[in-house]
Amino acid sequence: MSSVSAPAAAPALVPAGRRATFVELLSSTDHKRIGVLTLATALGFFFAAGALALVMRTELARSGMQIVDRETYNQLFTIHGTTMILLFAPPAVMAVGTYLVPLQVGAADIVWPRLSLLGSWLILLGGLTVWSGFLTENGPADFAWFAFLPLSDAASSPWDGADLWVLGVALSQLGVLLMGIPIMATIVRRRAPGMTLLRMPLFTWSMVATLLMVLVAWPVVIATMVLLFVDRNAADVFTAGGGSITYQNLFWFFGHPLVYVVFFPLVGAVGEVIATFSRKRFFGFEVTVLAQLLFAALSTSVWSHHMFTTQSVDNKFFSLTTTAIAVPAGVEYFAFLATMWRGRIRLATPMLFALGFVILFLIGGLSGIFVASPPLDYHVHDSYVVVAHFHYTLFGGTVFGLFAAIYYWYPKVTGRRLGEALGRWQCGLMFVGALLTFVPMFLLGFDGMARQIADYPGWRDWETLNTIATIGAWTLAAAFVLFVVNVLRSRRLGEPAGPDPWDGQTLEWVASSPPARHNFGHLPPIASYAPLHDLREQGRDPLTTVGGAPA
Amino acid sequence: MLAAGTIRDEFSELFDVYTWIAIGIFALVVVLTVTFAVVFRSSGDELPKGRHKNMPLELSYVALLACVVGLLVYLTYSTMDSGPYEATAQGGQPAEVDPHALPIDVTASRWNWRFSYPQQGVVVQGTGGRTPTLTVPQNRRVTLRMRSTDVIHAIWIPELRFKQDVFPGFTTTMTVVFPNAGLMREGGECNQFCGLHHADMDFDIDVLPAGQFDRWATEAAA
């Protein structure tokens, strides 16, 4: 059937009252199903890579090798890093975008849903390809997630697991790109009448900035992986073309926009959560949107700050562009705080996760300003300081932001709320765990502990700090167990949410929970980026006021 | 003979400024976030009044941020142009040449180090069971000319607050001064993941006063 002009009242493909079968879940072209499927894939990889981290942290609690050997340890951090940054984070933001963007712009469906579904399958297939290295004789790739040449070439890493890694990364990142294109096309082509660009919600705008970076950076990583595969299996590509430095330039040209891609949409989500739970509209919307676009533009010219110690790039230039990132990032923080100022704040779980994001990501951002300075980076580059820094951006930022989004939109997706008490405990344990795990790493790294080492000498007094970090990692594990319990519990005991449990401000909250196959029965008038908030200010009921034509 | 100060001194000065600014911003944001969450907490249903934009305020704030960034970049550039950093190669910037610096050729091979002293005719080779020692004179510039025979490595000397990568195919250099005599156990580390035994690819550093260094070189060459 055509998804382009289907009437809003089209019957659901799966009759009400029956759960979708597994095949229906895997093959639906409904953007909501694709979003849920992709998020399930991403969270599956998140928990699997988290389990690898627990093994590593447990090994590192004491000097000497206790539970794994060096080779296994090297495989563990390679697959942990690869999975978290390539198989969990970009798919997770694509999942949230695929689910929410059509709803937020008042569309009945996503453009090119089959392309989106293909992308989701490729992510799963590519991820399993990377992990299938565990089934090969020599195990999975063990050359770190950035696979620098010549360590990743056929001579140094002749194992099958390495080829599976290269193929799996290429396939999964092609999947991410294919999922991104339909979201962008939906934003461009399917906005409801009245939804001008500056009336798009903050989350949707953050997806625009994100997808601009995806369109620039992802073709580069796919091409780089194809070249690496050819280099490993057919003919020298990189040796002929400038070797290891060329590879690093290509990889980080992707790798730096990447870390903003997995963070921006969560800035948007956190911004919406803060606005909703402050009962105010987001402060400084236009400047924040402009800041995100500037941020996205800058993201293509900062990559060589990963290469300050290579003697092959202009350190001053990349230091300047990277430090300048503090301007748009600072604008976002200002907007968060100004939105809370004189609001009527409710500290429900989504808001708690959002506040955790604000504080923990700040540690990541501020430490990022340090490593943007070459003289400081010459000391801490590739040390545990950097490990701590990027975990505050990726865990404090991406993971806290994702859980703010999950707790906020879960009622919309499932029709039921998650439990508040379990949610508070999860948030509290994650916050404490994030401090216990990663603060010691700043101290260890400054004192000389390099990253990606299976062991450290016993005569160094590093065991106490490492043990604290290990306890923190297990605290995080406990938090995620609570999340799983909360989800399972909500399926039967979750309080029915209704369409708008939080007094939301954007269009998705007028759709039923979960939304019907084609999302909306009616749309309210759209006069700003917070259309439901407008109606509330006018004393009208957002759920019954009909304004825009059905999408 | 030497410009005053070492890389470590310059590093610490810059690091302190960055740290105080970071602590200030962090404390400010945390205090504001927590205060707002407490003070403005409310279960009431009516909507708060208030502005949702203030362009002059927002643009002044952007200008303030730009000034902070400008200050940090200025301090960073000044540090990069200061004596001890100027003496070594950084990024694409070549080192200022010091004819009095002691050259040492460093060869990295998985998973060990070889130090060769062309002026003294001394070669120190690490082997599987033995961590090699880099012996250097105190308070004299030492230029490490580094190459790898296989994959990328890096030399990090945490005590000096400095590191550089070591590549196959082309030479990188680092020019540093060791101000304190004595043995630094595992004072040098490989800092670019290079495979199976990366974690063990360390070396000791023995810093000797000038006279003692010459005696060591003569004995080692014999």
Image (cartoon, rainbow, N blue to C red):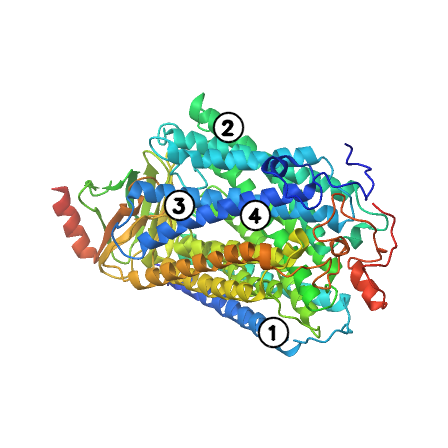
Q: Position of residue B186 (x, y in %)?
A: 25, 53
Foreground mark, 1 or 3, reads: 3
Q: Is residue B154 left or right of residue A203?
A: left
Amino acid at circle 2:
Leu
Please, which residue is most extreme toward the front here?
Answer: A17
Q: Position of residue A281 (x, y in %)?
A: 75, 64
The chain ID associated with circle 4 is A
Q: Is residue B65 visible?
A: yes
Please say if the residues under marks 3 and 2 sit with CB atoms less than 8 Å apart. Answer: no
Instruction: Name the residue tied to disc 4.
Output: A302
Res B32 label: 1
Depth order, front residue of A539/B107: A539
Q: Secondary structure at mark 3?
A: helix
Please say if the residues under marks 4 and 3 sit with CB atoms less than 8 Å apart. Answer: no
Please say if the residues under marks 1 and 2 sit with CB atoms less than 8 Å apart. Answer: no
Image quadrant where one finds the N terminus of chain A: top right
Foreground mark, 1 or 2, reads: 1
Q: Mark 1 vs mark 3: tell me if same chain.
A: no
CA gap, disc 4 and disc 2: 23 Å
Instruction: Name the residue tied to disc 2.
Output: A227
Q: Position of residue A9 (x, y in %)?
A: 81, 44
B222 is higher (above) or lower (below) than B142: above
The chain ID associated with circle 2 is A
Please, which residue is most extreme toward the top here?
Answer: A234
